[in-house]
Image: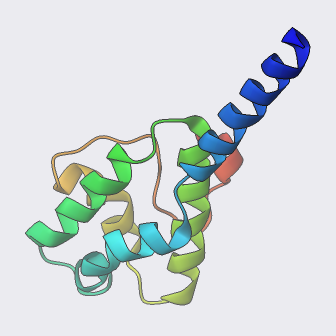
Amino acid sequence: MKGILVSLFMLLVVVVQLGESINCGEVGGALAPCVPYLTQGGDPSVSCCDGVKKVVETTPTQQDRQVACECMKSAAARYPNVKPDAASNLPSRCGLTTPIPISPTINCKSVP
């Protein structure tokens, strides 16, 4: 009986963790205000920086960061006029640090 309870608890933990993972809809929604900065330059808007902050705050685990990386990589591929320098400098322009690089060529498996 104890083994069954432990198994059920472990299953519940896995389900809860999977349910908390970030998805591309959330990443895209958070970073949508950044498109003008990423494609035209200038300064990122407050709403853009708020979106970057939200992505940073909702990616506490390596798995979350790798998922967010894949989402950003996929989104960057849909916008061929994204300026690579603007993308890579976005977090620092918002006064943030993140181990998730924004690049269409990044190997997201390498994100810590």
Where residue 21 appears, as percent x and y from the top left, is 56, 51
Residue depicted at 54% across the width and 70% down the height? 24
Relative to 107, 69 lies left or right: left
Using the rendered view, name the quadrant where residue 42 is placed: bottom left
Count of all numbered marks drawn on residues in the image: 0
Q: How is the image coloured?
A: rainbow
- The correct choice, above or below, for 85 with respect to 32 in the image is above
Q: Nearer the viewer, residue 6 or 45?
A: 6
Where residue 68 appears, as percent x and y from the top left, is 53, 57
Where residue 56 appears, as percent x and y from the top left, is 35, 47
Relative to 27, 67 lies left or right: right
Residue depicted at 15% across the width and 47% down the height? 95
Q: Quadrant of the C terminus?
A: top right
Where residue 45 appears, as percent x and y from the top left, is 11, 72
Residue depicted at 27% across the width and 76% down the height? 34
Relative to 99, 56 lies left or right: left
Residue found at the very far front of the displayed protein: 1
Q: Nearer the viewer, residue 97 or 89?
A: 97
- Asked whether residue 68 is in view, the answer is yes
Using the rendered view, name the quadrant where residue 52 is placed: bottom left
- Asked whether residue 44 is in view, the answer is no
Residue depicted at 21% across the width and 70% down the height? 48
Residue found at the very far top of the displayed protein: 2
Q: Quadrant of the N terminus?
A: top right
- The correct choice, above or below, for 60 with respect to 103 in the image is above
Q: Nearer the viewer, residue 107 or 8?
A: 8
- The correct choice, above or below, for 69 with respect to 86 in the image is above
Relative to 91, 5 lies left or right: right
